[in-house]
Amino acid sequence: MHLVIIGNGITGVTAAITARRLSPEARITLLGAESAHHYSRPALMYLYLGHLRYPDVKPYEDWFWPENRLELVHAEATSVDTAARSVQLATGQLLAYDCLLLATGSVVRTAGWPGQQLHGVQGFYGLPDLESMSRATHGIRHAVVVGGGLIGVELAEMLHSRGIRVTWLVREQRYWQSVLPPEESALLAAHILRNGIDFRLATELSEVLGDAQGRVRAVVTSTGQELPAEWVGLAIGVQPNLALARAAGLETDRGILVNEVLATSAPGVYAAGDCAQHRQPAPGEAAVEQLWYTGRMQGETVAHTLCGQPTPYRRGHWFNSAKFFQLEYQTYGRVPAQPEADIASFCWQHPSGKLLRINFRQSDNVVTGMNVLGLRQRQDTWERWLREKAPVGTVLAQLAAANFDAEFSRQHEPAIRREFSRQFPAIILASPRRKGLFGAQ
């Protein structure tokens, strides 16, 4: 069997490694147009910050690929012939395949602003974007970031680390209002302002202005204000990269449409990761999942199917994490911006800027999700509580078992339980576990 994988990001590489383990004799070819090797996309920010060197973002040493007989081809796939089962490369090479996996990832979304084609205006997704940003921001004084998602906060921190004055435009009335409840939004907005960012809510980009050399010099906002900008980062999100799939005649919508085993509309062709759209997502799950960990899970799942072991993709409980300057954020399960019917929401905040929210069903007190800011929690513990449908009283009593903060950090569990008892006096908490030298007991 010859398995060809287009895309050497986390999804494609996970699929290749898993397929090698399942099918020792298979020929596996991994195509990457962006770089000659796999790199950690979440680590790009730390390259710019100077915390990592370029070799540090390569999860696997160069010997790993030949050692595991994984063929790396640094070339762009220009077309796919699903009838002939072949892939045409920009180099002129034609690759025949038995099974094909499209793991083409995402592309930066733009909004058609006047002047967005000027030099110094760009999105941020991959290694070429980092290289362009590094060159364009060298020695500048003013930058503007547009868009309030996780890429936006990364860009703001990256630029600020080099002494560049950052103005951050977010069109929503409160920060990340489609995702976060009001308390979390307010805490993060205050934290961003404290870190020296000119953070402007309810403000949109209207136009980008250039100089005689075709380089950005300023932006005009929706309020009519002109702001100096020697670089503009567009962070309004990403969208599935569908160019190759559409040219091949595959069925697409927002993403490449796939069934539960991640098969596309063409025989022998599969899609996974950012570019895939589930035809029938499970209740409460997104049709398009654009996260590192879901990409890894889809890559592992589809590899089993490619190797003759059809395996439905099951994401399980939602999880995500991020960092807002020094403040860590984690979420597990379902914590929508507005509570759903029959859901109670407990929120504890500390004056230092820490926050814990736990959602639970009022009918049976079963925990359905949590948000945490500034307190590190163990994913496996929360995953188990959600899977086992633990009552909120039990979770709060055992909360120290989920604590992943550094040793000797201040413990807030007693204060959290007291606040819960004040907000929900009718719910009886179980006896708390004691945390000794070796963790929860």
Image: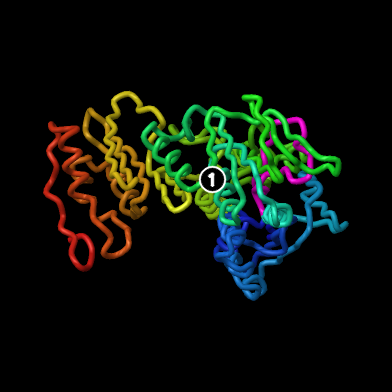
Q: Quadrant of the C terminus?
A: bottom left
Is residue 423 among the parts visible in the rendering? yes
Q: Is residue 250 magenta?
A: no
Is residue 7 among the parts visible in the rendering? no
In the rendered image, the vertical position of residue 151 relative to residue 309, given as above or below: above
* Residue appearing at x 68%, y 32% in the figure: 226
In the rendered image, the vertical position of residue 116 relative to residue 380, given as above or below: above
Q: Is residue 208 left or right of residue 198?
A: right
Q: Quadrant of residue 283?
A: top left
Task: Look at mark 1 in the image and give the residue it sits on.
Answer: 153
Q: Is residue 118 magenta?
A: yes
Q: Is residue 9 left or right of residue 97?
A: left
User: Residue 255 placed where, x, y %?
Assistant: 64, 37
Of the pair 184 and 358, the residue shown nearer to us: 184
What stretch of residues is rendered in magenta? 103-126
Q: Quadrant of residue 221?
A: top right
User: Residue 117 placed where, x, y %?
Assistant: 78, 39
* Residue appearing at x 64%, y 25% in the figure: 222
User: Residue 137 placed where, x, y %?
Assistant: 69, 53
* Residue appearing at x 23%, y 63% in the figure: 439
Of the pair 116 and 26, the residue shown nearer to us: 116
* Residue appearing at x 21%, y 60% in the figure: 440
User: Residue 29 placed where, x, y %?
Assistant: 70, 61
In the rendered image, the vertical position of residue 143 relative to residue 29, given as above or below: above
